[in-house]
Amino acid sequence: MGFRFVHAADLHLDTPFRGLGAASPELAERLRDASLDALDRVVAKALDVDAAFVVFAGDLYDGVERGPRAQLRFLRALERLSRAGIPSFVAHGNHDPEGGAWTAIRAWPDGVTVFAPGEPQSVPVVKGGARLATVHGVSYGKRAERENLALRFPVRRGGDGLHVAVLHANVDGAVEHEPYSPCSLADLTSRGMGYWALGHVHRHRVLAEGPTWVVYPGNTQGRSFGAGELGAKGAVVVDVEGGAVTRVTPFATDSARFCELEADVGALADIAELSTHLGDAASALRDAHGDGVTLLVRARLGGRGDLYHDLRRPGVVAAVLGDLRAEAPHDVAWLALVDETRPGLDLAAIRGAHDLRADVVALWDDWARGGLDGLPDALRADLELVGGLPDAAELGTLLDAAAYDVLDRLTPDTEVA
């Protein structure tokens, strides 16, 4: 018998957008319900595809102290599924562990299974007297779960429908996320499950396709410009035939989408041309993402040319950002411009000049090669004093910006390319 189910994770219900309040309080208030609306879209999709069941693989809430608004919204969602005869399976992760935290909900609707910490629980899904699937799951008992919980799951040897395992875990050391419940892909495929419904990683990823499918659906609503938060966010519909998964189809649930533009503006003539260029880029971005979603846009300005000097004049970047906001359609919100332009200097010629500028470039090269360990003690102390040591990528950006600024100040206008 063929059927479908829906797999969602990392809802982080009622969590605020990071940094949005300071940039635009009005927009932050307008989008306050975005994570809750994403949950409603998960339920709507389950009803639309006549899902046999729905899986929520951890981090429903953003913290141990779960707000009542988020809990009530989740309860109402499960009630809608229950009334439609669709069972729900819930596992908790590192943000919402089941370690005795306060809850506003003491009883759940019929058909809802909330997996407990400890040993995985196994629950059959039966329809018309036939077992469609067995769903196995476990919740975190504490936030920093370092045990490989995958190895607690039973080993299946086939038969009696599809076996689905629900776990919040970091597989093979996903670098953007804490190593909670760390495991390997081999750990998962060795258990004989037909489908691992994972949570924790906020990017949609299919790690394995049959006979064991291993899937991260991603989070249902992006929350910042972090690498794992950019672009479309949602959940997945899983098609099953003959007791085996045949297809995994993502669908969008977000109403606000973080997007970053990389704009090489080195060849642009002036600030007016820059504003037009960025407005056109945002329009193309809007066309690519379609209707029904608000785009939250940040642009990184790169390239080498005269705009480097214009953008360093006081108030210019803020003025361009204000102009973009004034001209943007209602579903495009400009949040930031990051100026990473550089002056049009000929570094090869400077290296061969045997002057103070060549010494600056040589020092720049030495520090860049040596990384944090190669910095003078005094500079390391200054960095720690103003906010801590940067990572390797941040250090490279800081060194580049500082070196270009010094070289530009030392270079006559006649030598700028």
Image (cartoon, helix red, strand yellow):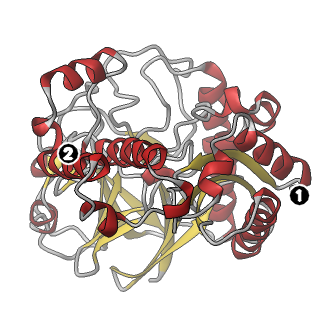
Judge depth for marks 2 and 1 and give the one in front.
2
Camera-side residue of 343 and 195 = 343
Residue 161 occupies which quadrant of the picture? Answer: bottom left
Camera-side residue of 186 and 50 = 186
The structure residue drawn at horizontal position 74% and vertical position 74%, both measured from the top left corner, is 284
Residue 409 to residue 24: above or below: below
The structure residue drawn at horizontal position 60% and vertical position 32%, both measured from the top left corner, is 19
Camera-side residue of 226 and 236 = 226
Mark 2 or mark 1: name the one nearer the start of the chain: 1
Residue 282 image point, x, y percent: 74, 65
The structure residue drawn at horizontal position 19% and vertical position 42%, both measured from the top left corner, is 181
Q: Look at the image and tell me whether residue 82 can be seen.
A: no
Secondary structure under the numbered disc 1 in the rendered image: loop
Q: Amino acid at mark 1?
A: Pro
Q: Look at the image and tell me whether residue 224 can be seen.
A: yes
The structure residue drawn at horizontal position 58% and vertical position 64%, both measured from the top left corner, is 305
Q: Residues within 10 Å of mark 1 (few under 14, many from 20)?
A: few
Residue 294 occupies which quadrant of the picture? Answer: bottom right
Residue 406 to residue 165: above or below: above
Q: Is residue 284 left or right of residue 409?
A: right
Residue 385 occupies which quadrant of the picture? Answer: top left
Q: Amino acid at mark 2?
A: Leu
Number of marks in the image? 2
Residue 87 to residue 249: above or below: above
Q: Which mark is residue 329?
A: 1
Q: Is residue 409 left or right of residue 370?
A: right
Residue 320 image point, x, y percent: 78, 48
Image marks 2 and 1: residues in contact by CB distance under 8 Å: no
Q: Which residue is mark 2?
A: 363
Residue 362 image point, x, y percent: 20, 51
Camera-side residue of 43 and 176 = 176
Q: Residues within 10 Å of mark 2 (few under 14, many from 20)?
A: few
